Every structure is written in structure tokens, then in C-alpha cells.
Image (cartoon, rainbow, N blue to C red):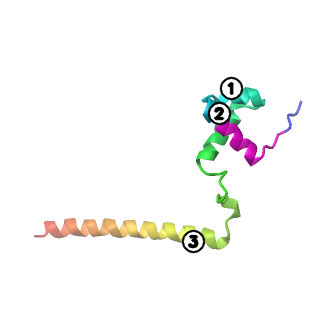
Amino acid sequence: MIEQLRKYSKEYKIKAVELSRQRGSMKEIADELGISSKNISRWNKEYEAGKYSENYIHSNSKSKEQLENIALRKALRDAELERDILKKALGIFSKSDR
């Protein structure tokens, strides 16, 4: 027998997470709703990560410019870190020359 995957709305997932938090038991809510407690656990993690908020941007929906901006910011952070390490090394070596 092939199980059919069920799709749940964002609102349904949020309500399930909120109920489990209010009652303190994912298993109890899962049994009442007829779903797996693993689903509620996963939804809870996604909820905490902000996936269900209105301004969440899925990585697949980012434009080329947004992805390029992210890559450039990472490269800048790496360059700044490298610069800071070199400054510290220069300070250490200049003290030892005295």
C-alpha cells in the first residue's frame, strides 16, 4: 500500500506548534491531530528558525543580485578577518625585533 503524502498549510503548522507549546506535549497534540510527532517537532524547529514568518525568504527564491550580495559580504568578512590576523602578526613580530 502506497501512502499518500499530505500537505499542511502554514497556518495549520503554526497552530499545531502553538498548541504543543501551550500543553507542553508534542505527542499528545500529534495523537489528537492524527499526525506524527516528528512532523510537529520539525515544524517547531522551522517555526523557531522563522520559516513561517511573513518576511522569510526561501533560498530558492533569491534573485541573482541577492545571491551575489551574500557572496560579496562573505568575501568581505573573510578579507577583514585576514587583515585583522595580519595586523596582529605584524604587531607581534615588530615587538620581537626590538
The reply, left or right, for residue 78 in relation to residue 91 is right
Q: Could you say where residue 23 lies in the image, as x and y percent from the top left?
A: 63, 29
Q: Residue placed farthest to the left in the image?
A: 98
**Region rendered in magenta:** 5-19
Q: What element carries label 2?
A: helix
Labels 1 and 2: the sequence-earlier one: 2
**Residue 23 on the magenta segment:** no
- Crowding at dot 2, Cα within 10 Å, few <14 / some 14-19 / many 20+, comes out as many
Q: Which amino acid does label 3 sit on?
A: Asn
Give the Cα separation between the discs numbered 1 and 2.
Answer: 8 Å
Q: Could you say where residue 25 lies in the image, as x and y percent from the top left?
A: 63, 28
Query: Residue shown at 82%/40% (left/top)?
Result: 6
Tell which of 94 and 24 is nearer to you: 24
Tell which of 9 and 78 is nearer to you: 9
Question: Can you say which quadrant of the picture contains the N terminus?
Answer: top right
Q: Residue 69: give its label.
A: 3
The reply, left or right, for residue 54 in relation to residue 81 is right
Give the Cα separation between the discs numbered 3 and 2.
Answer: 38 Å
Q: Could you say where residue 29 lies in the image, as x and y percent from the top left?
A: 70, 29
Tell which of 59 and 75 is nearer to you: 59
Q: Count up the numbered dots.
A: 3
Look at mark 1 in the image and give the residue it sits on.
28
Please name which of the two marks, 3 or 2, marks the residue nearer to the observer. 2
Q: Is mark 3 on a helix, strand or loop?
A: helix
- Crowding at dot 3, Cα within 10 Å, few <14 / some 14-19 / many 20+, comes out as few
Marks 1 and 2: CB-CB under 8 Å?
yes
User: How would you classify the magenta stretch by its main secondary structure?
Assistant: helix
Tell which of 95 and 74 is nearer to you: 74
Look at mark 2 in the image and give the residue it sits on.
20
Give the Cα separation between the discs numbered 1 and 3.
Answer: 44 Å
